[in-house]
Image (cartoon, rainbow, N blue to C red):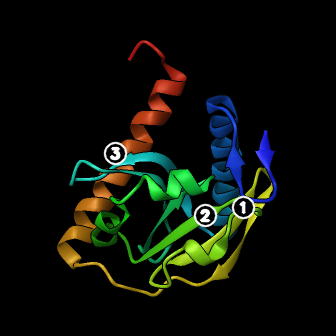
Amino acid sequence: MTDESDGTITSAGDATARTTETTRGVCRHLFDLGYAVLTEFSLANQRRADVIGLNANGEFVIVEVKVSVADFRGDSKWPEYEAFCDRLYFAVPPEFPNEMIPESTGLMIADAWGAEELRTAPDTGLHASRRKALTLHFARAAANRHQRLTDPRI
């Protein structure tokens, strides 16, 4: 259960469900914007992006999903994602106190049905060699996930 006054989640099950819903909304929003989307994507720096999207221009967006104040405060690794995307966003549920999200990132409000961009993330650019490596890694991850869906024994 969520306490609407402060965004507190009272159980691990609630947090997991809220994270799943928020992530789904973010993915739907990015898909509507023309992005191919993957979740729980491993980066070369051993970090894992909650959501990563690749658009037709080869631009990457990473979205870090935070569903509670405690979740946000307990995570200091998000700056390490900046080197792996053109734009970095936080996505939070509607009751989250938006003022906590750093101004140097974009901000989305999301639920299970979609997301709305409240603040556009600055375009930080991505080095050409990293873009090439990330694009290849993204393609292989997507192909491998698809293959495991069609043949679970792989």
- Identify the residue shown where x is 48% and y is 78%: 102
- How many other residues sit within 10 Å of disc 3, few (<14), some (14-19) or many (≥20)? few
Find disc 1 in the rendering and name its residue.
110
Residue 78 pos. (x, y %): 37, 63
Q: Pick whichever of labels 3 and 1 is earlier in the sequence.
A: 1
Are discs 2 and 1 less than 8 Å apart at CB? yes
The residue at the far top in this view is: 153
Q: Earlier in the sequence, mark 3 or mark 2?
A: 2
Give the residue type at disc 2: Ala
* Spatial CA span between label 3 and label 2: 26 Å
Question: From the viewer's perspective, is 8 left or right of 52?
Answer: right
Q: Is residue 53 above or below residue 47?
A: below
Q: Secondary structure at mark 2?
A: strand
Q: Secondary structure at mark 3?
A: helix
133 to 1, vertically: above or below: below
Looking at this view, name the residue that lies furthest to the front.
5
Give amino acid for label 1.
Ala
Q: Earlier in the sequence, mark 2 or mark 1?
A: 2
Q: Tell me where residue 108 appears, x and y as whole percent.
A: 65, 70
What residue did someone put label 3 on? 140
Q: Secondary structure at mark 1?
A: strand
Q: Quadrant of residue 141?
A: top left
Instruction: Give coordinates of residue 132: x percent, y percent.
Output: 25, 67
**Which residue is outermost to the left?**
129
**Of the two numbered discs 3 and 1 in the rendering, the one whose residue sits closer to the viewer:** 1
Q: Residue at x 54, y 73 (%)?
A: 101
Q: Is residue 100 left or right of residue 85?
A: right
| Label annotation for residue 91 | 2
| Residue at 50% in and 84% down | 103
Q: Position of residue 54 (x, y in %)?
A: 47, 65
Count neighbours of disc 2 (C-alpha within 10 A) and say few if under 14, some if 14 to 19, many if 20 or more: many
